[in-house]
Image (cartoon, helix red, strand yellow):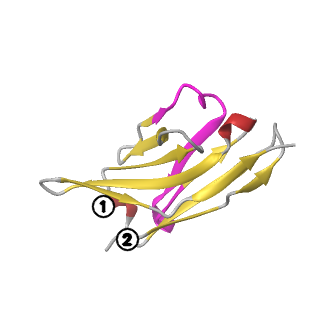
């Protein structure tokens, strides 16, 4: 069973930075794509950023220019560097991985809280 473990969340002031990490229990090269979603209270879960196995990246408009997704295959870890944080970035951030084996398999981490407040 694939396990994804997020870390790096916390409380930060507006304008600050955080780096989230997502450690996978198997080689991340086995996934077709990995990404980060977030869910704020009372809102639907939304895609923040994702990166394919070939390195293509995609970002939500609201985070472009501020967030960067990256991967370290040697450490089986995906990162989300978040700069210039805003109060509206406050949410639970979830790591996800997708693997196609005839069918689409989605895996999720347990989530990590990010709070942006003065």
- Name the disc covering residue 45, or none: none
- Residue displayed at 72% across by 39% down: 83
In this rendering, is residue 70 above or below 72? Answer: above
Quickly name the residue at label 2.
26
Crowdedness near tag 1: few (<14), some (14–19) or many (≥20) residues, C-alpha within 10 Å: few
Asked whether 72 or 118 is in front, the reply is 118
- Residue displayed at 51% across by 54% down: 94
- Name the disc covering residue 30, or none: 1
Quarter of the image with the N terminus is bottom left
Name the element at disc 1: helix
Q: Quadrant of residue 117?
A: top right
Which residue ends up furthest to the top in the rendered image?
61
| Contact between labelled residues 1 and 2, with CB atoms less than 8 Å apart | yes
Name the element at disc 2: loop
Quarter of the image with the C terminus is top right
59 in the magenta segment? yes
């Amino acid at each position: 069973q694939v396990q994804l473990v997020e870390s790096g969340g916390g409380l930060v002031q507006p304008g600050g930075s955080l780096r989230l990490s997502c450690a996978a229990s198997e080689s991340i090269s086995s996934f077709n794509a990995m990404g980060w979603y977030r869910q704020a209270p009372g809102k639907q879960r939304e895609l923040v950023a994702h990166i394919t196995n070939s390195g293509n990246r995609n970002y939500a408009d609201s985070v472009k220019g501020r967030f960067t997704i990256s991967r370290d295959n040697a450490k089986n870890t995906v990162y989300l560097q978040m700069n210039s944080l805003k109060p509206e970035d406050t949410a639970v951030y979830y790591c996800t991985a997708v693997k196609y084996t005839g069918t689409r398999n989605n895996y999720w981490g347990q989530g990590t809280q990010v709070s942006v407040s003065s």
